[in-house]
Image: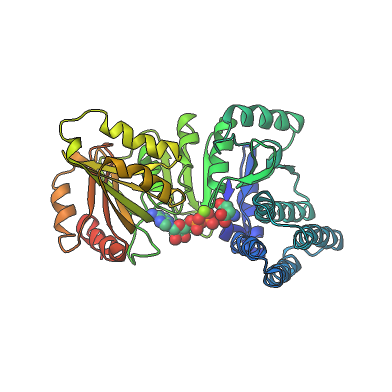
Amino acid sequence: MKFGGTSVGKPERMHHIVSLVTKETEPAIVVLSALSGTTNALVEIGEHISKGDRNAAKQTIDKLEAHYQDFISKLVQKPEAVAKAKSIIAEHFEFLNIILKISFSEALNKDILAQGELLSTKLFCVYLEEQGIEHMLLPALEFMTIDSYDEPQVGSIKVKLSQLLQQHKDKKIYVTQGYICRNARGEVDNLKRGGSDYSASLIAAAINATVCEIWTDIDGMHNNDPRIVKKTVPVERMSFDEAAELAYFGAKILHPASIWPAQTYNVPVRLLNTMEPQAKGTLIEEKAGSVGVKAVAAKDNIIAIRIKSSRMLLAYGFLRKIFEVFEKYRTPIDMITTSEVAVSLTIDSSAHLKDILKELEPFGTVEVDQNQTIISVVGNEISKTEDMVKKLFGSIMNIPVRMVSYGGSPHNISLLVPAEYKTQILQQLNKGMFGLE
Ligand code: ADP
Ligand code: ASP
Ligand code: MG
């Protein structure tokens, strides 16, 4: 059972999730995110320190500490619990204050970012203890590891986690941190923003859980981005493939990589609403509920690169050479379309853009369009849906589409559009494909 930032972000919400956890008949591993707003504040602290602005960092630390003092004053009441909660806060904020005096490094920044999940889980356990609820805190830093390519080491996670569970096998409630892990150098690291979903799925896979529940602030995966489009509806069932495409292409409810562990080990995933536990939510499993379009999602900050060359005409090996450049800079390609004399592809990271462009130059004319958005229309066997293409393109005729990718998977059609059209295209698709206004 994974609870996201808003699900633990207020004392009364933490109280509430205890009622959800204790309802379970089977033993549960409870994976917690940091309280909402905390990771953003920690990112800010790291940025201030890296720029040498220690005063601004100190101010953010103090503000965050005040927030936690207020939080525990409503979380726990009994004197021993209050004392414990206070000492947890003191320990972690002392750490942050010490960091102010140390020279900045990326490794140190990861330590800063880890404080949120360490705090939320420890405070949650103090509350469980106050309530007399038996539980066990499993430190994620003892079992969640990534390799030198930042890939989770599922085999090792499995072994270490089962050893820990074996040592405490009488418990029914285990609590652990989402997001944080150790890297190949043994340092504290993380699974990138929104990574608690990924932790939950990895844990569910590692223990072969009966289900991986992602409890959040909305009643499941909606057909469109509810932050942008007014009228959206939850999708009751979808396949792992569909959910993976949506997560990867921008549906924020799931971390982009969070589906594969559950899918590989065939653990069903349920997306549920902490604020409305009786709502059906979304069930994600191997088989899709039905054929047809399920949802659309948008992924921002995309860079499109077009390489034009008459040498590509009837040549072989051209694409391999181009792909090798991206491989060299470990930059994943999201979309690709080709014509006889040009290839267009997209990346979502500008980290090595300069080097990539320099190495692409010898292959032909290179054009770059920054600030693009991928719009993905996702659904099982999407092409078999009657009128799908007509509905899709019919509803967005006024929008300049830069690229189209169709047929790569049977579950997805992706369109690339300039970012300024994102809201408009999501709204028009909502009407055109789902009949929702
Ligand atoms: P948590 O803190 O629980 O991890 P997130 O904020 O990461 O929660 O994810 C939940 C949010 O994802 C929702 O509040 C919603 O605004 C956003 N979201 C974006 N796309 C979708 C979608 N297709 N379906 C549901 N929620 C979505
Ligand atoms: N706390 C982390 C973040 O805000 C991880 C998560 O919430 O999933 O990104
Ligand atoms: Mg999230």
Q: How many marks?
A: 0
Q: In which quarter of the image is ligand 2?
A: bottom right
Picture coordinates of residue 111, whole percent (x, y):
69, 51
Q: Which residue is drawn at 36% across and 54% down?
A: 302
Residue 414 left/right relative to 167: left
Q: Quadrant of residue 290?
A: top left
Q: Which residue is drawn at 75% across and 48% down?
A: 133
- The colouring scheme, among rainbow, by chain, secondary structure or one colour, is rainbow
Picture coordinates of residue 90, whole percent (x, y):
81, 61
Picture coordinates of residue 102, whole percent (x, y):
76, 58
Q: Quadrant of residue 422?
A: bottom left
**Which quarter of the figure is the N terminus placed in?**
top right
Q: In which quarter of the image is residue 226?
A: bottom left
Relative to the observer, which residue lies in front, 367 or 93?
Answer: 367
Quick one: which residue is furthest to the front in this view? 362
Relative to the observer, which residue lies in front, 146 or 338?
Answer: 338
Picture coordinates of residue 166, whole percent (x, y):
72, 28
Q: Which residue is drawn at 16% across and 64% down?
A: 398
Residue 236 appears in the figure: no
Residue 30 appears in the figure: yes
Relative to the observer, which residue lies in front, 101 or 275?
Answer: 101
Q: Compared with residue 160, is residue 136 higher up or lower down, i.e. above or below?
A: below
Residue 275 left/right relative to 357: right
Q: Compared with residue 376, is residue 384 higher up or lower down, i.e. above or below?
A: above
Residue 140 left/right relative to 284: right
**Which quarter of the figure is the C terminus placed in?**
bottom left
